[in-house]
Image (tube, rainbow, N blue to C red):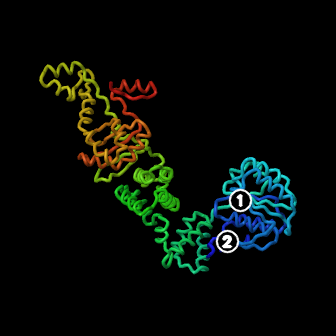
Amino acid sequence: MSQALYRKYRSKKLSEIVGQAHITRLLERALKRGAVAHAYLLTGPRGVGKTSIARILAHEINNLPYTDESTHLDIIEIDAASNNSVEDIRDLRDKVQIAPVSAPKKVYIIDEVHMLSKSAFNALLKTLEEPPEHVVFILATTDADKLPATILSRVQRFNFRLIGEADVVAHLRAIAEAERIAIDDDALRLIAEQGQGSFRDSISLLDQLQHVADGAITAQLIEESLGIASAQDVDALLAAAAAGDIAAIVQQLGAMEHNGVPAPIAAEQIARNIQRSAISHPERLALLGPLAKVIRSPWPYTSLLVALTSQANIVTQPVATATALSGNHTVKATNYPARVKEPALRETPQAFKKPPKAPIASPRAHTSAAAKSGADATQKSAAPVKDDKSNATSTAAPARDKENKEEESFAWDDFLAPLKESAAGAHSILAKCKYHYDGATLTIYAGKKFAKTQIDKALPALAESLQTIGLPDIEITVLAAPKPPEDSQTAAIIAMMGGGEEVSL
């Protein structure tokens, strides 16, 4: 049976460790001086060499040669994940009193030490405080934050780092050449990227791919094997978001979903691309927040679609401007799919602006107009009228009549009908919402942030519904606030009461 590559190419000396020079240099210097501590703590991400260094250090403390199959009676490895009880540690505490069999020191390597129970830590503490002269403890963990402060204060701590991509690529290239594995540079970089700074994961992935490759290992083979998006797909999504091309975003995401690319993986790839290109494309940084939410979402592909489409206009703005944008989404339904925009906080959406209240014409002016023609009194009152005293011209017809007429001209029920099929969740929320339509903009008052979020997710479907009812040039603005009262006096009362909503009884 063939040996796994990560075991076959595991380092045998401290000098062979890659990517942790800040640790190996200190340990080599201490060993040369004979300054061996009684307890070490190796902490850091998985797969970066903690266990390898623990074993190498244990052997070099005792001047013993090390190979992956090396065993020695005075070097004892304990897995704290399965030996974490207080009885296990009490047993260990009794055994440490026994002198080494043949080596100068008896070394205990306790892996995943954070898994010990609280009582087990308490039992270990006394031994760490006053260990026998012949004993050395090497503790390893991926989660040092779970260790009691009393333990941390009694060990020499070494923090491991994730391995740099260049170091991983160079190491993988050396292994590939030694194993005669045909692989191109793009594939090596992709493996290093997927390994996320872990040597073990990267080498294991190379080992896996060499058995499925029919010839050379390519980036395309890796993408197909791991179910990840290609670099071209990620670039295409970011380009579509920058252009505000929702049709391209929807099409690209649909193709990725069909090819089995999980949305959280796609979101991570997009975020990684944005981080790499932060200097050349700082405007894309606004996408990182929405992308982070995709991983935790119960509907990851929907969240990814919303993240890309709702930020389509933001990614074209400078970073300083993007941070000042509000969450009030505006969609223009021109040749669906529509373009999603977010107005700046300093701007008020046109649909939300109240028309200025018209000055009331003087009674004498109305009387005069009515005396001229009783039949045309209503029509005349809507025309500009001069006040004899002030010489001011005003429009006597209330703005409210015009507003009501405009709202009645919008077929709200017809607009909602298609959403029963295309966006059932949003339809149930919209059925309870109020709206305002001024002939150019449809403002939807969601009333609550949650309701607004659900409507925002269905913005493409809303834009399509506008086209269905013959209003392709209408913009949609979604606000989390309730619809403000039409009457200024009512609005003032609500403001005095600290908020509220006008209802009809």
Q: Amino acid at mark 2?
A: Arg
> Quick check: 474 left or right of 109?
left
Give the labeled residue for mark 2: 10
> Quick check: 151 left or right of 319?
right
Residue 201: percent from the left, percent from the top?
Answer: 59, 66
In percent of the image, x 49 and y 79: which residue is there?
215
Q: In the rendered image of this protein, does residue 438 appear above or below residue 421?
A: above
Helix, strand or loop status at disc 2: loop
| Circle 2 Cα neighbour tier, 10 Å, few/some/many (<14 / 14–19 / ≥20) | some
Residue 274: percent from the left, percent from the top?
Answer: 49, 59
Q: Nearer the viewer, residue 168 or 225?
A: 225
Q: Nearer the viewer, residue 225 or 466?
A: 225
> Quick check: 46 left or right of 479?
right
The quadrant the C terminus occupies is top left
Q: Which circle's residue, 2 or 1, is located before the other in the chain?
A: 2
The quadrant the N terminus occupies is bottom right
Give the labeled residue for mark 1: 79
Q: Amino acid at mark 1?
A: Asp
Q: Does residue 373 show up?
A: no
| Circle 1 Cα neighbour tier, 10 Å, few/some/many (<14 / 14–19 / ≥20) | some
